[in-house]
Image (tube, grey):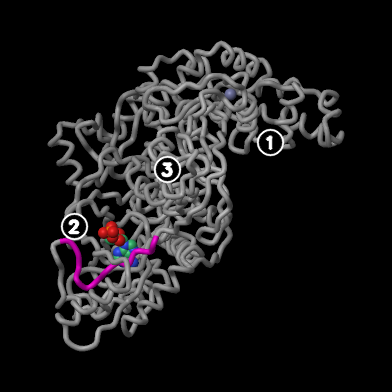
């Protein structure tokens, strides 16, 4: 077997396993074996760039950066849907339809997935581009990001037409959404409000490898094109499924409107069992011939209508408002409710977000409030039943002092939340910071759990995470339920954390807004803690993807005497506060401020190595040529359109050798 055959075979295999896992939900290979094969393919592709394929499975991991998304006109307009809210609305719709078409009308019933709509264009079975809905006429091209979504086929199977568009919804299933939020909260960031906005925000991230990390899914529902071999909507769903798309099996063919009602009633009750969000049912005239006859209004097809589920809402009594203090000192007001059943679960608490929210809705203890479980996972209070307000009720006075340490709260301009500024003396903040420090993604200290941290703090054995490194077995043995073995494990776990690399240590410090990714960026840029601590706000903002909010937070952290002392102590215990020799090897700032586009086939180094060299030397790699491009590194077979673009913009085109000279 020659190299090309080997590459093709690997691609084919990986595609199949990917399809089985992400579309059919039926794994046919272990993750480990999959990774091995993917690595093999990556190596071959690096070594033989002449076999590059824009739809290779290796592209699923992302890595390309898009600074500006191109605007692209849809070949076929993306319409909206008319809404209905009752059986009567639907019956009226049917009456209108029956006046316009002859014969019986059948319907396809589908769920209305709540996400971000997308239009995918396939040509000869290859994904050509992916475009957001935009204004319906034109949208943003987000192909590189879309390729990272595993359930979207990059190549089709079966008897697909030569060219068509397929539309669907990018959704973020609850499980993945909740996991992302847990991570955000660990980093001291505000959780995302709902899966839909998070899904649509994901499509516009500049770094496609960030998109790859998000567990997005894509559910398809509509094929458009010229002269397609399809006669009904229901058939088109089956076909799409055969070509490799993920099309929920839930869709049903209804012979008449009363079967449509059955479908609606069933899913109104059962939709909460689904792994993703839905907000209604879409009813479509099944025959494409009838669809054509019915046509479109200015905004929506006449042949389809959405039926919106009622948001689940219940009335219950607000017993008390309590206030939680997070590890960053942020105060969150929480509504403690008379337990009530909502969307299949018992709700006892709801978030009140912040003081403004309470004031806006004039929410008072003793009120009967409406609780809703809409897009948001955490139930929210959407209003007050004023008729039921007790006569002696008084407006809610937001707390002025921390419920845990009685320090006066502060609220900075532009911040919706109040904060307890007593970072070093407020117990939940002290405990929360240490819990964050030891957490899995930070210092990953085995043998030390969250409850033990609280116990250690309460017993005055530690006040700060740096104190962990001076703990002794003798000190902790007297603690409640602490056996000798677990005491030893705890100390060993603390000791072992000294090998955790700098970027994770930086994350562990718990600087507000410095999550995992930002920590990695800062570590890579500054290389050691002193350089970071001495950076000015302007310098920080100049680091790629660091905005002023993060910059201010970093400055604030290092301006605290206490924090500086803590870091000195960590240093003295041997915690890694700089990038290691190996990571540092070969790194320079020679290309700082320069952006490169790499195109073509190279001889001395592979395309990937070239990109790594650019980054190692402080440069940036971009996928498309623009005014901001400093150089195009051109190999053999560079595309003529790229060359023309570079020349048109006056971007210098350099050879592989020129580039290597630049960094030598
Ligand atoms: P709206 O945004 O309320 O006008 O509703 C129209 C949108 O519903 C479309 O743009 C799609 O993104 C979305 N949608 C979700 N599920 C479906 C479905 N099964 N069929 C058609 N559209 C759907
Ligand atoms: Zn406090």
Q: Residues within 10 Å of mark 1 (few under 14, many from 20)?
A: some
Q: Position of residue 557 (x, y in %)?
A: 51, 19
Q: Nearer the viewer, residue 35 or 389?
A: 389
Q: Position of residue 404 (x, y in %)?
A: 62, 26
Q: Are marks 2 and 3 in contact (CB under 8 Å)?
A: no
Q: Position of residue 143 (x, y in %)?
A: 30, 51
Of badges 2 and 1, the one in the foreground is: 1
| Residue at which label 3 appears | 210
- In the image, ligand 1 is in what quadrant? bottom left
Residue 2 can be seen in this image? no
Separation (CA) of disc 1 from disc 3: 29 Å
Q: Is residue 532 above or below residue 614?
A: above
Q: Is residue 217 above or below residue 560?
A: below
- Count the marks: 3
Q: Helix, strand, or loop for circle 3?
A: helix
| Residue at which label 2 appears | 74
Q: Nearer the viewer, residue 397 or 393?
A: 393
Tell me the quarter of the picture where residue 104 sits: bottom left
Q: Residues within 10 Å of mark 3 (few under 14, many from 20)?
A: some
Looking at the image, the residue that sits furthest to the top is 561
User: Which residue is pictured at 48% across the width and 54% down the height?
Assistant: 315
Residue 301 painted magenta: yes
Q: Helix, strand, or loop for circle 1?
A: helix
Separation (CA) of disc 2 from disc 3: 26 Å
Q: Position of residue 439 (x, y in %)?
A: 63, 36
Q: Earlier in the sequence, mark 1 or mark 3?
A: 3
| Residue at which label 1 appears | 450
User: Which residue is pictured at 25% across the width and 40% down the height?
Assistant: 68
* Direction from residue 446 to residue 315 in the image, left or right: left
Q: Earlier in the sequence, mark 2 or mark 3?
A: 2
Q: Which residues are magenta?
A: 299-310
Q: Nearer the viewer, residue 490 or 267?
A: 267
């Amino acid at each position: 077997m020659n190299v090309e055959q080997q590459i093709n075979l690997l691609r084919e295999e990986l595609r199949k396993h990917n399809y089985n896992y992400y579309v059919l939900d039926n794994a046919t290979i272990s993750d480990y074996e999959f990774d091995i094969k993917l690595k093999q393919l990556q190596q071959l592709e690096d070594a033989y760039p002449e076999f590059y394929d824009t739809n290779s499975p290796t592209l699923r991991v992302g890595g390309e950066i898009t600074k500006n998304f191109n605007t692209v006109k849809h070949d076929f307009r993306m319409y909206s849907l008319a809404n209905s809210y009752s059986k009567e609305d639907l019956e009226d719709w049917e009456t209108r339809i029956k006046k316009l078409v002859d014969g019986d009308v059948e319907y396809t019933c589908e769920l209305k997935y709540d996400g971000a709509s997308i239009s995918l264009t396939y040509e000869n079975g290859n994904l050509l581009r992916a475009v957001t809905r935009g204004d319906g006429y034109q949208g943003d091209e987000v192909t590189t990001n879309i390729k990272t979504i595993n359930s979207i086929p990059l190549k089709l199977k079966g008897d697909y037409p030569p060219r068509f568009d397929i539309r669907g919804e990018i959704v973020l299933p609850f499980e993945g959404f909740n996991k992302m939020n847990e991570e955000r909260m660990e980093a001291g960031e505000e959780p995302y409000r709902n899966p839909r906005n998070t899904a649509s925000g994901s499509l516009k991230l500049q770094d496609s490898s960030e998109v790859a990390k998000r567990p997005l899914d894509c559910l398809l529902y509509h094929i458009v094109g010229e002269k397609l071999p399809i006669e009904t909507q229901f058939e088109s769903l089956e076909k799409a499924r055969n070509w490799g798309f993920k099309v929920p099996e839930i869709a049903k063919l209804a012979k008449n409107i009363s079967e449509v009602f059955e479908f609606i009633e069933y899913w109104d009750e059962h939709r909460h069992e689904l792994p993703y969000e839905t907000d209604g049912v879409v009813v479509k005239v099944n025959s494409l011939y009838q669809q054509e006859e019915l046509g479109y209004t200015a905004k929506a097809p006449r042949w389809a209508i959405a039926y919106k589920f009622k948001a689940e809402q219940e009335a219950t009594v607000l017993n008390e408002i309590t206030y939680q203090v997070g590890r960053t000192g942020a105060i969150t007001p929480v509504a403690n409710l008379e337990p009530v059943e909502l969307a299949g679960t018992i709700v006892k608490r709801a978030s009140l977000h912040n003081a403004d929210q309470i004031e806006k809705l004039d929410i008072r203890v003793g009120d009967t409030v409406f609780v809703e479980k809409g897009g948001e996972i955490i139930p929210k209070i959407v209003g007050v039943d004023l008729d039921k307000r007790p006569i002696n009720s008084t407006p809610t006075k937001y707390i002025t002092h921390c419920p845990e340490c009685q320090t006066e709260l502060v609220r900075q301009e532009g911040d919706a939340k109040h904060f307890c500024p007593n970072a070093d003396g407020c117990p939940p903040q002290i405990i929360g910071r240490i819990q964050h420090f030891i957490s899995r993604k930070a210092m990953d200290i085995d043998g030390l759990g969250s409850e033990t941290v609280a116990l250690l703090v309460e017993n005055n054995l530690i006040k700060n995470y740096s104190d962990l490194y001076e703990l002794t077995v003798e000190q902790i043995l007297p603690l409640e339920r602490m056996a000798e073995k677990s005491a030893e494990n705890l100390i060993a776990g603390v000791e072992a954390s000294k090998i955790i690399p700098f970027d994770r240590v930086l994350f562990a410090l718990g600087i507000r807004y410095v999550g995992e990714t930002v920590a990695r960026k800062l570590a890579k840029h500054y290389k050691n803690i002193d350089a970071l601590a001495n950076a000015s706000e302007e310098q920080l903002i100049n680091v790629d993807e660091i905005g002023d909010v993060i910059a201010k937070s970093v400055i604030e952290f290092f301006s605290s005497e206490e924090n500086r002392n803590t870091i000195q102590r960590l240093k003295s215990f041997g915690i890694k506060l700089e990038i290691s020799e190996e990571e540092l090897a070969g790194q320079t700032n020679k290309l700082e401020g320069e952006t490169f586009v790499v195109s073509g086939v190279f001889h001395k180094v592979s395309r990937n190595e070239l990109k790594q060299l650019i980054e190692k030397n402080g440069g940036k790699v971009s996928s498309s040529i623009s005014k901001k491009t400093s150089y195009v590194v051109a190999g053999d077979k560079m595309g003529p359109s790229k060359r023309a673009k570079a020349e048109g913009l006056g971007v210098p085109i350099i050879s592989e050798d020129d580039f290597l000279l630049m960094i030598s």
